[in-house]
Image (spheres, rainbow, N blue to C red):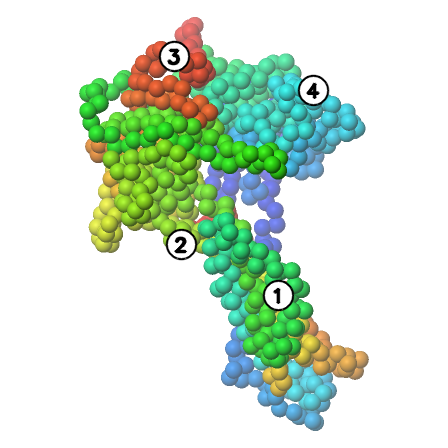
Amino acid sequence: MTNTSTIDGNAATPRASFIAGSVIVSTVVLLAILSFFWTPHDPTAFDVAARFSPPSFTHWMGANHLGRDVFSMIMVGARVSIAVALVAVGIGVGIGAPLGLVAASRGGIIDDAIMRGGDLIFAFPALIVAILITAIFGPGAINAIIAIGIFNIPVFARLTRGSALPLWNRNYVLAARTAGKNRAQISLEHILPNIMHLLVVQATVQFSLGILAEAGLSYVGLGAQPPTPSWGRMLAESQTMFSFAPWLVLFPGLVIFLFVFSMNLLGDGLRRRLDPRSEGVS
Amino acid sequence: MTPTLQIKDLSLKIGARVILDRINLSIHAGEIMGLVGRSGSGKSMTGLAAMRLAPENASIQGDIILEDENLATASEKHLCSIRGRDIAMVFQEPMTALNPLHSIGMQIAETILIHSDTSKATALRQAGNLLTRVGLPPETISPARLPHELSGGQRQRVVIAIAIAMKPKILIADEPTTSLDVTTQTEILALLKDLAHQDNMGLLLITHDLAIISEMADQIALMKDGRIVEQATPQMFFNGVASSDVKELLVQPVTRTMRARPSKDDTKPVLKASNIVCAYPLPRASLFAPKRHLRAVDGVSLTIRKNENVGLVGESGCGKSTFARTLLGLAVLSDGNIEIDGAAFPSPNAATTHNLRRKIQIVFQDPYSSFNPRQTIRKVIAEPLNLLDARPDKKTERRMVTDALSAVDLSPDDAEKYPHAFSGGQRQRIAIARALITEPEVIILDEATSALDTASRNRVLELLMRLSEEKGVSYLFITHDLSVVRSVTDRLLVMKTGRIVEEGATHDIFEAPKHPYTQKLLNAAPVMKQFEPASP
């Protein structure tokens, strides 16, 4: 008797979720870019006649208590959310990754100083401090970026240091040292390219956390200020009207959920693709 | 008598690639089946497939019949109850096969607890008995020890104890001694042989070492490109029937007679190390105890003259690799001094040190971690050019890389490929090309051929010898493999726990070893058993 058996797991699923994730993420990004040139309605215009109008052909996602078009506000809000999260991640990678590389390559007191500094930041609850920062320096998108960005620094510093340390014992690093390369050269030529995939995946995670943090700050009124629309503030403004105009809460909430969720799917898919252990790496 | 394990027409594919092609093997109770072949021939995959542990993306076809059950069709849940109970495995690397967080006694007891209903106390007692059986009696080695408190050989004994805990019918040992020293190797092999015969257990011994197989196996199967090309008793295998495939594998390590060399005492030493000490601080025994140090290298002196090959042998952990790193300036030099070409190294002047590095390069043991997986071979080989005073321009650099590649018998087109496209032997040649590009005086070969099969090893050694004639480079062979140093070195140093115990001309040491440790090393090396010619 001959039998054929495949021990092939569910190989199709990760790819499907990766595609779904990238489709949704790029749709939202495209809508955000489109909002610079065109929105169905002027997102800042009040149209008293359209107050509380439910989703229809003119107002695809309805209109709010001031008659502002929800879909247009979500499009412009995406712009704010993505910009804040993107720059905050940029701050985290741009400062955290070099700090992590330095910590791993120097060791000793420098390593301790950098990592304990990171622990210090980690010791504070992120959102509370972000609220504190925006409360002191005034609400607004820029201060939100800084507040969220600071907390991304130790995340990337830890990840970089942790994944760089074992690489320093690899023979190719020893070979580079016998070739007279200094620590900075080795960090850039040998360490960074081999941990890049981890940083990219972590960036997608931090990006979706940044979206959530921005929504949270805006929800308590410390993010982008009116009349600039923002996903978080749309939720805050409309929650009391949930009983008679549920779409006002539903659509921004749904968009936040979908975007963060697909960002995570995308990150997971990227992790599988970029992992050097998986096939087809070159 | 029906065999305990019967593998029938087993094929394994990963994607469209055929890894195993209709394998047929049967192992009887108490029989030792030796599975030999070059690296990449599918030996290990056969072992894994027999336990249904092949990679997730592999598809298998055929039958694996253990007594009266077909493992090829068994469910994963059922397989879990069979693995470890009826069929067990010992892997090559004892460092990674044990959980670093659990005591060795507990790890053995765990296997017993999974497969039987005994109490924890009984399981632990059985674990103690098993440890005694594999030569780690509780009186000397406490079952409460953690894996890192044991040597490599002791860990491999623990792994074997786990494997035989449930008295399996079949034990698969995949290169069980390859990462161990010769002295430990002999002991582990004797242990496996005893266990197979006493417990009437079938043993599938996978190895690339024919000397081991000739000593151990009752039946030998030779694999090539995923197929079994030869299967015979050792007597038939080593005499008579040997096909060209067997002959290819039977090539002995290069046994070139002593190289006729003029006495070189007058030539200038290219590397001179005197009284090297490498000490690492150990944790204090108590708060006020004096700081202790581990002297990994303890007063070693070594001189290498122009065009001379020196061997440094010793068991793993004797400090030979630390010594190599010290010579390269990669490890702390606690005491002593190094001279390269008459100049002190490392020099207080950073630029001088940089210049001296050009004259000493290294080839590492592991051909897999020696290269950055994300760099092309061109970048890999050109890296030491960083040591030249003026980095050559693009065109010169291209020419140098091409020359270095052709010097090690690789094609210039290989420069654009990535390391994963090459086999172990090819990678070692790339590593040699990298070491050669700065035209060094000395190349340190730190177990550079240990990970290769005999045929690739011979090619690498031939290449090294040719290069030494052509370029006048000297080698320091650091190894535990005596067959390598015998054929290619002029002088030999034997190292034990950080000290040199014997030193002299290679020929003299092999003919008349003086120190008992050297004698032990020489006796332990596996030698091919001689078989009487097969009777017609």
Tag count in the figure?
4
Dot 2: element: helix
- The circle drawn on residue A209 is 1
Chain containing mark 1: A
- Are there few (<14), some (14-19), or many (20+) residues within 10 Å of tag 4? some
Could you say where residue B102 lies in the image, as x and y percent from the top left? 66, 35
Q: Report the residue marked by disc 2.
A: A184
Give the Cα distance between marks 1 and 2. 31 Å
B220 or B373, which lies in front? B373
Return the x and y of residue B515 as percentages of the image width and height: 41, 14
Sequence-earlier tag: 1 or 2? 2
Name the front one of labels 2 and 4: 2
Q: Which residue is disc 4 drawn over?
A: B129
Identify the residue at image location x=66%, y=32%. Answer: B103
In the depicted structure, whether residue B173 falls above or below residue A186: above
Q: Which residue is mark 3?
A: B514
The chain that hosts pointer 4 is: B
